Amino acid sequence: MERFGARLRSAMENLGPLCVGIDPHPQLLTAWGLSDDAAGLRKFCETCVSSMAGRVAVVKPQSAFFERHGAAGVSVLESTIRQLRDAGTLVLLDVKRGDIGSTAAAYADAYLDPTSPLASDAITASPYLGFGSLRPMIDRALDSGAGVFVLALTSNPEGAQVQRAVGPDKTTVAQAMINAIAQVNEGVAPMGDIGAVIGATVGRSALELSTVNGPLLAPGLGAQGGKVDDLVDVFGDATRLVLPSYSREILGRGPRVEDLRAAVTRTLDDVRRLL
Ligand SMILES: O=C(O)c1cc(=O)[nH]c(=O)n1[C@@H]1O[C@H](COP(=O)(O)O)[C@@H](O)[C@H]1O
């Protein structure tokens, strides 16, 4: 399979730089007139697939909102991933996994092995057991044409306690993650397969991004207060690598497919103005 970075670059060029999250919060299920159970979840996801497949570059289902319905919820996650991928839409499964290497290899089996029922185009991963602990996931992604988005500087205010901490070499932890990602992506064209997650809410972040050569997922827009215009401050010259991500801001316009599609179009117009 073609590498993930190349597939993502063409999706961003063809459809615009936008990731829409499928986060079926119980409040959203209720607002959409659906039951807070696996049947409601299935209907919610069918509507999302009809509104988004083929229209946005990346769709990001948040695993926890499926897991809270048990095995039946995970079954909805499986079919949602499959429907999106069958339609040619890239799926970034938001699972934020991170563990010792031997367990990280099992996570790679679960999400990055093309034969797994939950196989996705990319996953989110947490490097806070050490960047090296992610190696089995990164290696599997590189082997199978998939990607990994590594948390660097997250959108929540609590993240700063760990991510802005400064190491003995005077580098912040977040910058050390960016540097480690840059090493994996070095020399890959048109763009590396390993992304970084940097919240749109982090302000002038002082991260040095000139060598990262990978996609920069920017959540925190809309519901968490981040605005498209903030992206220039946060990302500076690296804005062409930015993949803005919205969940509640768009999902809150449902449940009508036409309204969700209109929200996607409006958001795309807004991000294209800048990126
Ligand atoms: O990895 C993520 O996607 C993520 C990283 C981060 O720093 N902040 C963040 O909000 N997210 C996720 O992005 C989504 C944001 O949702 P909204 O605030 O509704 O747009 C949620 O699924 C979060 O779990």
Image (cartoon, helix red, strand yellow):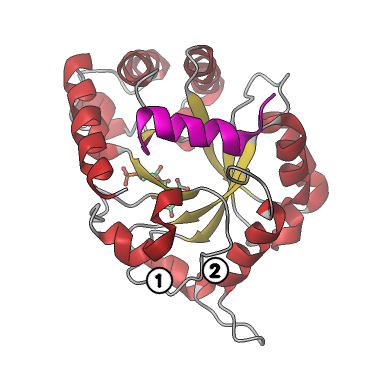
Marking on residue 205? 1
Task: Assign the magenta stretch its main secondary structure.
Answer: helix
Q: Position of residue 205 (x, y in %)?
A: 40, 71
For numbered disc 2, what is the local secondary structure?
helix
Q: Residue, x 69% and y 52% (percent of image)?
A: 187
The stretch in magenta equals 1-19
The residue tagged 2 is 174
Answer with left or right where residue 24 lies relative to residue 118. left
Q: Is residue 133 visible?
A: yes
Q: Residue, x 60% and y 86% (percent of image)?
A: 170
Q: Position of residue 153 (x, y in %)?
A: 47, 63
Q: Residues within 10 Å of mark 1 (few under 14, many from 20)?
A: some
The reply to whether discs 2 and 1 touch (Cβ–Cβ < 8 Å) is yes
Q: Is residue 92 visible?
A: no
For numbered disc 1, what is the local secondary structure?
loop
Front residue of 54 and 189: 189
Front residue of 17 and 263: 17
Q: Taking 46 as reference, is 218 above or below it?
A: below
Q: CA distance from mark 2 to mark 1?
A: 10 Å
Front residue of 5 and 262: 5
Q: Taking 247 as reference, is 197 above or below it?
A: below
Q: Position of residue 59 (x, y in %)?
A: 43, 30
